[in-house]
Image: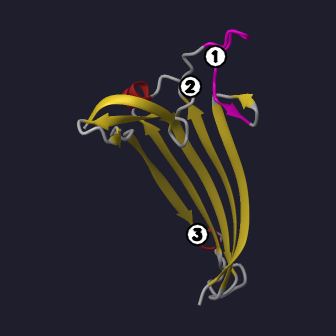
Amino acid sequence: MATSVFASAASIDGASTVLFGVNAAGAPVVIPQLPVRAKGGFTQLGLPLSRWFGHDPEGRHAGWSLYLMYGTDQANTRDLLHTSATASSRARSDMSVGTLNYKLNKWVSFAYEQSLYRTRANTATEINPATGLPRYPLFEGVPQHEWRDLRSEGGVIFSF
C-alpha cells in the first residue's frame, strides 16, 4: 500500500494515468489500478448460399457460403468518468464483418472478407480555446469523435 504519490505517467494507450508512490518502508511501488469494466457481445449468421439456390452438392457451385458477424463492446460510463475525464479515452467500439467463402474441393477454399471496425471517443468535456470546439483525440492528424478502419482481405485456405 502506497503512503504517498511521487510520480505519474500516461498509460500505454493514453486513456489513464499510472501513479507511482512509496510504501511505509520507503520502497517505490506502483499504485494499483482497477480495470475498466465493459459489456458487449457478438452475433454471427452463416448462410449456405449454394444450398439455397439449389445447386448440386457434388457440382462446381456447391461450395458458396456467406457469414455475417456483428460485435460491440462498451466501457461502463461510471468507470470512464472515474478513470479519465479527458477526451482521449475510448467509450465504445463495434465491428461488422461479411465473409464470402467458396469451397473448390475438400482441400482448397477461397475467402473474401470485408470488415468495418469503429471506435468512438468519450464525449469531449474540454474546449479548445483557439477554435471554441470540443477537443477530441487526433486520428490521421485531425481531431475526431469516431475512428473507422475499413478492411478488405482475401485468401486461400488449404485443408489437410
Residue 23 lies within the magenta run = no
The image shows residue 37, relative to residue 42, as above or below, that is above
Tag 2 near tag 1, CB within 8 Å: yes
Q: Quadrant of the C terminus?
A: bottom right
Q: CA distance from mark 3 to mark 2?
A: 44 Å
Prevailing secondary structure class for the magenta stretch in the rendered image: loop
Q: Nearer the viewer, residue 10 or 105?
A: 10
Residue 132 within the segment the image draws in magenta: yes
Disc 2: which residue: 87
Residue 45: x and y, percent? 52, 59
Name the residue at 53% across, 27% down: 122
Disc 3: which residue: 48
Where's residue 136, x and y in %? Answer: 63, 25
Label 3 or label 1, whichever lies nearer to me, is 1
Please state the extent of the stretch shown in magenta in the rendering.
127-139
- Label 1 neighbourhood size at 10 Å, few (<14), some (14-19), many (20+)? some
Q: Outermost residue, front direction?
A: 26
Q: Which mark is residue 11?
A: none
Q: Is residue 155 left or right of residue 87?
A: right
| Kind of residue at disc 1 | Pro
> Could you tell whether 70 is left or right of 54 in the image?
left
Q: How far apart are labels 3 and 1 at the CA level?
A: 47 Å
